[in-house]
Image (cartoon, rainbow, N blue to C red):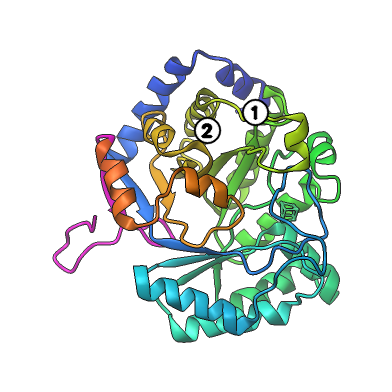
Amino acid sequence: MKPSEILELLRQEVWVLGRHAYAIRKSLYGDVTTYISNMVLNYTNVCVVGCSFCAFYKPPHSGYLYTVDEAVEKVLEVDAAHGIRQVLIQGGVNPEVGIEYFEELFRRIKSKAPHIAIHALSPLEVEYLSRRERSSYREILERLKNAGMESMPGGGGEILVDSVRKTIAPKKIDTETWLRIMEEAHKLDIPTSATMMYGHVETLEDIAVHMYRVAELQQKTGGFLAFIAWNFEPGGSELGKKIPHPKTSATLLRIIATARIVFNNLIPHIQTGWLTAGPETAQLAMYFGADDFGGTLYGEKVLEWKRVEAPIDRREDVVRIIKAAGFKPAERDNYYRVIKSPSGHVET
Ligand code: SF4
């Protein structure tokens, strides 16, 4: 689909889009909505990139950095309390952290808890590590994979249009670099997610171009497992002073429905984006094409204040929300495979 065709879809009435997207979702997944029991390990909040939309980062010497021991302990604690299947490891670009930190962290987690999949870092951190270690993207990704990294989130995708990136995050990697690192990961059989953060300075045309670029790479590699759209949350960020109000739920529903149509036969899973949208909108999102709720996100710190607004802290909370919307919850693993009990029943 060309960007102009995607734009035409984005401009349709939201319920028309929703009906179309729901029909596709229903034919692929019926009434099943998957979710994962996972935690987020924000190993540091120190970052030198300083994006205007980020209320999480602190400059060097003003924030925290977990030692590998502390980080491993946190993962094991959450696993003992809740039984997790995935840890999402993300932080800022902290100049004190080299690749050995991640190699040791991944190896230690895998040796103590091999059942926990490591979903870690992002193209931004890979680019930083490649400069720090004077190695290619491929070499960095190979080392991370050998240490236990199984998949990579799509962090830093924001909007894949350089004029937008320059406005909201001028020190962040450009569109081409984000796409190149994703391509390298896919070539090494590291599946990834494609993310998009909307609701700031972008136009509908920019959103169409973003989806087009993701679809174009997916046609080449097939390595994106899911598409996840996040709303910009002003919080205490610099950008929030200029854009104090987030977009309404209708924007998310429009984007999710368009994504389901655009990525049909390309990217299998579309997430609800519950963290920024809230549980009620996430329930509606399932009627607009989303088939995956996302995770429990134990320990998440970047949008901690949003989790206070909508505490979804246990598997039971996710299951209840999915069921209340009229869908059948099914727990999945890191690769979006539904987990079945030995008797063949789907675990809910
Ligand atoms: S969004 Fe990420 S890269 Fe940007 S300032 Fe925050 S932590 Fe750093």
Is 333 a magenta residue?
A: yes
- Dominant secondary structure, magenta: loop
Q: CA distance from mark 1 to mark 2?
A: 24 Å
Q: Is residue 250 left or right of residue 332?
A: right
Q: Amino acid at mark 1?
A: His
Q: Residue at x 73, y 65 (%)?
A: 126
Q: Which residue is mark 2?
A: 259
Amino acid found under the numbered disc labelled 2: Ala
| Rendered image quadrant of residue 52 | top right
Q: On the image, numbered disc 1 is attached to which residue?
A: 245
Front position among marks 1 and 2: 1
Residue 12 position, x and y percent, is 53, 14
Work out whether mark 1 precedes mark 2 in sequence or the reverse, and give the earlier one.
1
| Quadrant of image for the C terminus | bottom left
Q: Per the image, is 305 magenta?
A: no
Left or right: 95, with 12 as reference point: right
Contact between marks 1 and 2 (CB within 8 A): the answer is no
Residue 332's x, y, as percent?
35, 58
- Residue 184: horizontal and vertical position, in percent? 68, 61
- At a point 53% along the width and 30% down the height, the residue shown is 252
Q: Quadrant of residue 314?
A: bottom left
Give, as a single range, the part of the protein colored magenta. 325-348
- Tell whether 161 sits left or right of 157: right
**Residue at 61%, 59% in the rendered image:** 186
